[in-house]
Image: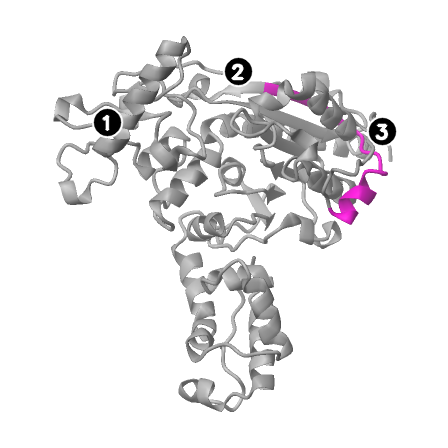
Amino acid sequence: MTVQTFSGNLPGIKPDKLVRKMQIDDIAEYIKSTREKLGLGRTEFANLLGMSSTGERTVRGWETGEHKPTSAKINLIKNLENQLNKFHDNAPFNQTELKTPDFKFIDLFAGIGGIRLPFQKLNGKCVFTSEWDKFAQKTYLANFGEMPNGDITQINASDIPEHDILLGGFPCQAFSQAGLKQGFSDTRGTMFFEIQKILVEKRPKVFLLENVKQLKGHDKGNTLKTIMGILKGSHNFEVTDDMSMSEEAKHALSEKLNYWVDFKVLRAADFGSPQNRERVYIIGFDKDYFNNTNFDEAFVWPEPPKTKTRLGDILEDLSQINDDDDKFTISEKLWTGHQRRKAEHKTKGNGFGYSLFNSESEYTSTLSARYYKDGSEILIDQTDLGKRPRKLTPKECARLQGFPEEFIVNAVSQGQIYKQFGNSVCVNVITEIAKSLVNTLITAQSKKLKNKAASR
């Protein structure tokens, strides 16, 4: 989203008399023109105004004159541009100064921008973002100064700007151990086809997709095989009645892609992050565009340095924290429950239960989106302080996932930020993949231009 300059006032009406003087038709036009000039959809507009899940419908009613907002809401709308400008000016990763990017990319299912960061650092320009979760949108806005577009199923692929690289950490719950593993029969699983519709329409030169490790083995490997086949243009996929996807996505499946595609499972702990987090990464290069490049030779996956990690390197010193400020040490009731459940599981002969770590631990378990509930997968031992175990702090979650120190972690509640980092990617791993992808893109592009010049 690009923030545009707009006075926020109706012609001939002074700001302090705006609410009192405006008639319902004037209000409808004012709201619509404000929203459009700020480049916001109705849902994003409603989210910025702090409205509920039905906010989009309410905004639509305002714009059609069916009803009008309260004076307080009108004043919020009037101040919205200033609010967005402040976010943009204070965002640590805004791209205001980037005038001549080496490539353009889009960020789909963006979350809080973990996949974006390394590509932006390599002098790439993000020209479009999509993220439907309103809390993730707030964290994204605070850090990048841009309000992401919402539900990708409601966005026409033709409306998305031209780009060189498509990035997408498409929803993983349908394939994860924590989920029901329903795959393509789950609405979240069909989000892959929203990526496919954009690939068909825009034909970016390169893509990078990310998902949980379990995608590799889902349905005995058939789900990943289907995805790879669709991307290569070698698979005839039929939409079944139990699959929920947009009509545009269904139509796009009749079109053939032609990408060179490969995938690899990489572990965060092998790339300097003290976390045993494994994810599958799928990359592709457009063979129709790069028709003279052998990507089996041109692209090389990054070699994990496997530098020894230590959890203490990312932990904060909480030894002096006041009891009133301690939001991380778990309660006596929760700790008792954790110990009881672990003992019960041990009796049954399995290893389920909480996991306890300290500063000398080499790495933790995988940080998940459910971490906010009880912190059971990663508890930090505080025996030396005479305290019960604690959860990670939001800053520690950011570090565990490889985010820069200046990344803003307090734009939303503690519970929401735990969810966001649990759903995010390990930036360390993406950084190394990004280097390989961009280097290969630049080399292949240069080769294409040389061949074109030689053929003249």
The residue identified by callout 1 is 389
The residue mark sitting in front, 1 or 2, is 1
Identify the disc placed on residue 17.
none
Question: Which residue is at 37% across, 29% downward?
Answer: 400
Which residue range is magenta in the image? Answer: 246-264
- Front in this rendered view, residue 209 or 413: 413
Number of other residues with Cα within 10 Å of mark 3, as a class: few under 14, some 14 to 19, many 20 or more: few
Q: Position of residue 20 (x, y in %)?
A: 45, 89
Say which element carries label 3: loop
Q: Position of residue 51 (x, y in %)?
A: 48, 63
Say which element carries label 2: loop
Q: Quadrant of the C terminus?
A: top right
Label 3 vs 2, first from the N-terminus:
3
Using the numbered discs, state the Cα–Cα distance from disc 3 to disc 2 in whole angstroms.
Answer: 34 Å
Magenta stretch: residue 258 in it?
yes
Q: Quadrant of the N terminus?
A: bottom right
- Check disc 3 and give the amino acid type: Asn
Say which element carries label 1: loop
> Does 267 sit above or below residue 8?
above
Q: Position of residue 454 (x, y in %)?
A: 82, 31
Number of other residues with Cα within 10 Å of mark 2, as a class: few under 14, some 14 to 19, many 20 or more: few
- Check disc 1 and give the amino acid type: Pro
Do the CB atoms of the residues marked 1 and 2 lie less than 8 Å apart?
A: no
Answer with the quarter of the image where residue 420 lies.
top left
Q: From this viewpoint, is residue 66 visible?
A: yes
The residue identified by callout 3 is 236
> Does 370 sit above or below residue 129?
above
